[in-house]
């Protein structure tokens, strides 16, 4: 009998592409990096991706891939969703100050036997001319402002405003995407704006409101870093709230690294763990 022809390089490549087509990917989002990754996946026929938002922002930006909004019901609910939707890889691209969903992602992916990558932004580091004071929590940051009345720019999430409500001697300016809920400072100017913000705009804001001190989370990334540069220029003190510890899977730093992990480096969790 004549022997079967050896597969050509092109046929082998086509088989690999076919086997890798329509990989179902879940992105846990809410960051600029998550949106950047969604754009990369939208243009790649090998993947079928869904971007999940926690629902903390009333009107999230439109995305080029399927989206869902709302929680999963803890680690158990997320594991069930992963199994029901036949998800093959999860990428945690949530905010550095959202440790609960990251904890749930690690547990759920282990239970579901699915590989997990965590997109971790490098934290900001003080540079020459910076006047930073660190605080472990928003409550500690509120106390660190001091007893003398000051004009304070709050660069943090709306869930943290209640921590400053009882520190009533200061005048506050807070910049948020959505209206806050719950307690808030009485002397508060609320700016509803969505980043990114450039250096000149941040400089004008700090001067216009005669800011004496900034309270910020160390979010990392470039979208909101301009306020730190403007504070350096004006020699304003910054009270920086320390990042919480977040459990992680395989760590990537950018959307491009996340794509590389999906296409080349993704482990088999049944053999190597998440």
Image (spheres, helix red, strand yellow):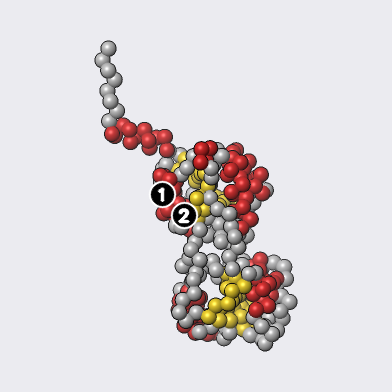
| Residue occupying the far top of the picture | 1
Task: Name the residue rendered at 61%, 58% in the picture.
Answer: 99
Q: Is residue 215 left or right of residue 230?
A: right
Judge by depth and name the residue closer to the eye, 66 or 212.
212
Residue that badge 2 annotates: 252
Q: Are marks 2 and 1 in contact (CB under 8 Å)?
A: yes
Q: Position of residue 237 (x, y in %)?
A: 55, 81
Q: Which mark is residue 39?
A: none
Q: Position of residue 162 (x, y in %)?
A: 70, 71
Q: CA distance from mark 2 to mark 1?
A: 9 Å
Quadrant of the image occupied by residue 20? top left
Rendered view: 94 above or below 236: above
Task: Name the residue rendered at 27%, 23% in the picture.
Answer: 5
**Would you call the spot at circle 1 few (<14 residues within 10 Å), some (14-19), or many (20 or more)?**
few
Which element carries disc 2, helix, strand or loop? strand
State how many labels appear.
Answer: 2
Which element carries disc 1, helix, strand or loop? helix
The answer, for residue 146, to whether it is visible in the render is yes
| Residue occupying the far front of the picture | 272
Q: Earlier in the sequence, mark 2 or mark 1?
A: 2
Q: Quadrant of the N terminus?
A: top left
Rendered view: 172 above or below 102: below
Q: Which mark is residue 260?
A: 1
Judge by depth and name the residue closer to the eye, 59 or 212.
212
Q: Position of residue 94 (x, y in %)?
A: 55, 57
Q: Position of residue 40 (x, y in %)?
A: 42, 52
The answer, for residue 60, to whether it is visible in the render is no
Task: Name the residue rendered at 33%, 33% in the picture.
Answer: 12
**Would you call the spot at circle 2 few (<14 residues within 10 Å), some (14-19), or many (20 or more)?**
many
Task: Name the residue rendered at 54%, 66% in the picture.
Answer: 219
């Amino acid at each position: 009998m004549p022997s079967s022809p050896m597969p050509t390089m092109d046929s082998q490549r086509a088989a690999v592409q076919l086997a890798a087509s329509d990989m179902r990917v879940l992105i846990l989002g809410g960051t600029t990096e998550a949106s950047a990754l969604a754009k990369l996946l939208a243009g790649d026929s090998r993947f079928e991706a869904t971007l999940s938002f926690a629902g903390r922002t009333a009107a999230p930006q439109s995305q080029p891939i399927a989206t869902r909004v709302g929680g999963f019901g803890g680690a158990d609910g997320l594991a069930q969703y992963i199994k029901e939707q036949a998800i093959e890889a999860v990428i945690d691209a949530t905010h550095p100050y959202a440790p609960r969903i990251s904890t749930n992602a690690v547990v759920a992916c282990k239970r579901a036997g699915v590989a997990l990558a965590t997109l971790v932004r490098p934290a900001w580091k003080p540079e020459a001319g910076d006047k930073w004071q660190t605080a472990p929590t928003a409550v500690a940051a509120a106390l660190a402002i001091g007893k003398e009345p000051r004009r304070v720019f709050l660069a943090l999430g709306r869930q943290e405003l209640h921590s400053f409500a009882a520190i009533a001697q200061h005048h506050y300016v807070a910049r948020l995407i959505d209206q806050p809920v719950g307690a808030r400072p009485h002397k508060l100017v609320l700016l509803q704006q969505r980043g990114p913000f450039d250096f000149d705009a941040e400089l004008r804001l700090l001067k216009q409101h005669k800011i004496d001190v900034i309270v910020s989370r160390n979010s990392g990334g470039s979208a909101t870093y301009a306020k730190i540069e403007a504070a350096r220029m004006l020699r304003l003190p910054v009270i920086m709230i320390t990042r919480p510890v977040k459990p992680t899977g395989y760590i990537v730093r950018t959307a491009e690294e996340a794509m590389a992990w999906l296409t080349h480096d993704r482990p088999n969790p049944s053999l190597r763990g998440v």
